[in-house]
Image (cartoon, coloured by chain):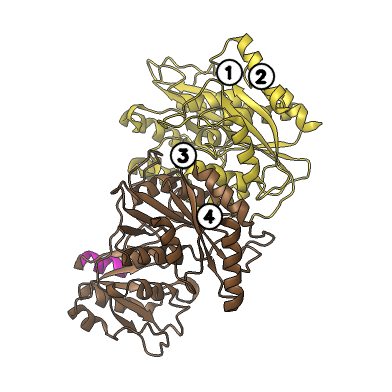
Chain colours: A brown, B yellow
Amino acid sequence: MSMTELKTPYLVFLGDAQDLLMAKVAKGVAHWRPEKCLAQYRLEGAKADLGLPEMPIKQAAEAGAKTLILGLAPMGGTLPQSWIPLLIEAMESGMDIASGLHIRLNDIEDLVAVARRTGQRLIDVRHPELSLVCGSGKPRSGKRLLTVGSDCCVGKMFTALAIHQEMAARNIKATFRATGQTGILIEGSGVPIDAVVSDFTSGMIEQLSPANEADHWDIIEGQGSVLHPAYAGVSLGLLHGAQADVIILCHEEGRVQMDEMEGFEVPDFDTLIETNLHLGRVTNPNIRLGGIALNTSSLSEEDAMKAIARYQEKYGVPVVDPVRTGVAAIVDGLES
Amino acid sequence: MSMTELKTPYLVFLGDAQDLLMAKVAKGVAHWRPEKCLAQYRLEGAKADLGLPEMPIKQAAEAGAKTLILGLAPMGGTLPQSWIPLLIEAMESGMDIASGLHIRLNDIEDLVAVARRTGQRLIDVRHPELSLVCGSGKPRSGKRLLTVGSDCCVGKMFTALAIHQEMAARNIKATFRATGQTGILIEGSGVPIDAVVSDFTSGMIEQLSPANEADHWDIIEGQGSVLHPAYAGVSLGLLHGAQADVIILCHEEGRVQMDEMEGFEVPDFDTLIETNLHLGRVTNPNIRLGGIALNTSSLSEEDAMKAIARYQEKYGVPVVDPVRTGVAAIVDGLES
């Protein structure tokens, strides 16, 4: 597998984003990997602010920036023509360009020509060039945790990053393994698993999370849900490839209807847990539930703590809201 | 979705194949769709024989052949140089070329140039050009049967084709829906589902098997197994996209070890049936087991009939060996 590694530090490009919702990827990179972010670069009229030093391209290059991160979703999904000279300037100043956009920078002739001339890279993380391998199912050393979901967009990446951060703070050997474009731009490497041809899903996760020291944890970002009507195949390939020792169930408290799937309700926790463990046993007979991570942002503090206590009582595992409570209780459980 | 339709009738090219194992795809096309096969074309020294009239390219073209089917796997997976002039001659005589090979005809410059000049098509069924769509999970009219497996290569395509044939003989409205390259060359259309990017697996099957008359059956070719350590994601995406009303469990009697998966045993029938039904209920709450199709070729006639009787007793559904007994019992069960 050829897995792109982004060079650090980054200049995070915010364009003319009016808020951080428009710059979600940039926000994730700055939040989780501040040490990799040298500066931000904003166009006139931009209101989004990551709180990083402001630097135009040349100044950032002189200060050592190695990669310009294109971390926003321009309206309509296309790249504004006016940005192209800026990206060319960045390459001419010695930076690679990394993009999580749907459109491919490698399809834009002017950019490709400059990349060729300067030797800089155009890295489209949604469109990886991978040498594909099928799964073997063979056990490998090291420990693996996978975040699994009740639906899409329930906090699987956030939870995995929070657990990784907590482990790092405790000097537990751990690596975050990214499987989506935001996670990849945060970590600087990974496999955008939903862009891989289906036959290779498990095999690519085996490559992403190779054999490691016995006390090393891979914290693998999950995708979708094994009971999702459109994307369950991705989630199951990921579960099998991960050979997870531990799964953490992630859920947005209060979500009843599945996101963008009219007529589909979010399955109950019992079904979700049992289905994930049953399917996960195919490649790891010792798979277990290590905790539940709730997004309780729609609840009051009091109701949130009640919900957490209720699930903890029912399932007998640590239950957290990574934002409200942190994930220490989950990591405590893994250490004990 | 742009689904390639092959023009009929076919000239089936056998190269210098020494036996029908080397020409498995050609054999499948001639066996299941004899009415589409005008003739066979063999090179000197070939011993494989489909029992079709022999015709060289020009004669076949004059007799009306519209597509040359490249239905074999040359040694080493490459296309022998000496075949290229033959394929050019076929295009110049007015035929499309359809290939199930791993290598792409569309990567061979000489062929592409002639295709452009003559207006004939080079159809690589393993490398489809598809407009990709995600699944919606929305129910659609018509009835759907999916063959599911205990492993790879256990007779899922054969069983689906046999059920389709039996239905056609009874004037039941039915369409065979191909999901692998051999099935696609047999049917003349389909989606090679293991070559589709994982996010789109379910959506492509929804497109392959669209809404239909209430009494029409789609007989959908399954792939892999939902408990396969490497390919379960493909099988699950297929199951969800199919919204199967009925599944037929396919198994090779006597297989204990999974094909090419060292250390993995074939799961037991109870687990396979319950897992498929449990997962299938996500998109069709009324999914049911409609029968079991065994490949009993490793057993004596007596032992085969005993195995069939034993499963029938245990699971209470029709059990067949499509080759030994035919599949009438399964179709009887669907009609009752």
Q: Are marks 4 and 2 in contact (CB under 8 Å)?
A: no
Q: Residues within 10 Å of mark 1 (few under 14, many from 20)?
A: many
Q: Residues within 10 Å of mark 3 (few under 14, many from 20)?
A: many
Query: Bounds of the magenta span?
Result: A110-117
Asked if marks 4 and 2 fall on the same chain, the answer is: yes
Amino acid type, mark 1: Thr
Residue at position x 73%, y 30% in the image: B167
Against B138, is A120 above or below?
below
For numbered disc 3, what is the local secondary structure?
A: loop
Asked if marks 4 and 3 fall on the same chain, the answer is: yes
Residue that badge 1 annotates: B296
Find residue A298 and report its horizontal and vertical position in percent. Answer: 59, 75
Asked whether residue A79 is drawn in magenta, I would say no
CA gap, disc 4 to disc 3?
26 Å
Find residue A83 and report its horizontal and vertical position in percent. Answer: 35, 78
CA gap, disc 2 to disc 1?
9 Å
Residue that badge 3 annotates: B229
Q: Find residue B308 and name its label.
A: 2
Against B90, is B203 above or below?
below
Could you tell which of marks 2 and 3 lies nearer the N-terminus? 3
Q: Chain of mark 3?
A: B
